[in-house]
Amino acid sequence: MNDSTSGGTDVIDNTERRRFELAVDGQLAFANYRMVGDAAHITHVETPVALRGGGVAGRLMAGALAIIRARGQKVKPVCPYAVAYIQRHPQEQDLLA
C-alpha cells in the first residue's frame, strides 16, 4: 500500500517496501526505514547517480520528514546522509527520537 500523504511534495511512503520514494525523470530515489515504536529509523538513503548533485536527496528527506511529522511520529537517522541532513536543518530536530 502506498500512502501519498507527503506534505506538499512528490514523496510517497511505500509501506510495503518500508521506504520513502521520490520519482524524478523516470528514476527513483528512496530512503529505507524501519519502525521502532513510533520512530522511523532511516537506515539508507539512495539517489541514482544521474540525479546526484541536484538536490533530489534533500527533497526526498524533506518529504519523508513532512510525512513523519504529519503522522505525529519521530525519526532516528541511522544513515550518514540522514544524520547530516537533520544536522543542517535545525527546524527538523524536534522530530528526533
Image (cartoon, rainbow, N blue to C red):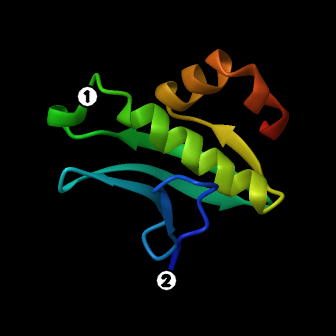
Residue pictured at 38% horizontal, 50% vertical: 30
Q: Is residue 37 left or right of residue 55?
A: right
Q: Residues within 10 Å of mark 1 (few under 14, many from 20)?
A: few
Residue 73 occupies quadrant = bottom right
Q: Amino acid at mark 1?
A: Arg
Discs 1, 2 touching: Cβ within 8 Å: no
Residue pictured at 41% horizontal, 57% vertical: 21
Q: Amino acid at mark 2?
A: Met
State the SS at label 1.
Answer: loop
**Mark nearer the N terminus (1 vs 2):** 2
Q: Which image quarter is the C terminus in?
A: top right
Q: Position of residue 87 (x, y in %)?
A: 66, 18
Q: Which residue is mark 2?
A: 1
Q: Is residue 62 above or below residue 26?
A: above
Instruction: State the count of labels.
Output: 2
Residue pictured at 71% horizontal, 44% vertical: 75
Q: Which residue is mark 1?
A: 52
Q: Position of residue 54 (x, y in %)?
A: 30, 26
Q: Position of residue 66 (x, y in %)?
A: 67, 49
Residue 42 occupies quadrant = top right
Residue pictured at 53% horizontal, 40% vertical: 61
Q: Is residue 33 above or below residue 79?
A: below
> How far apart are the two marked residues, 1 and 2, measured between alpha carbons?
28 Å
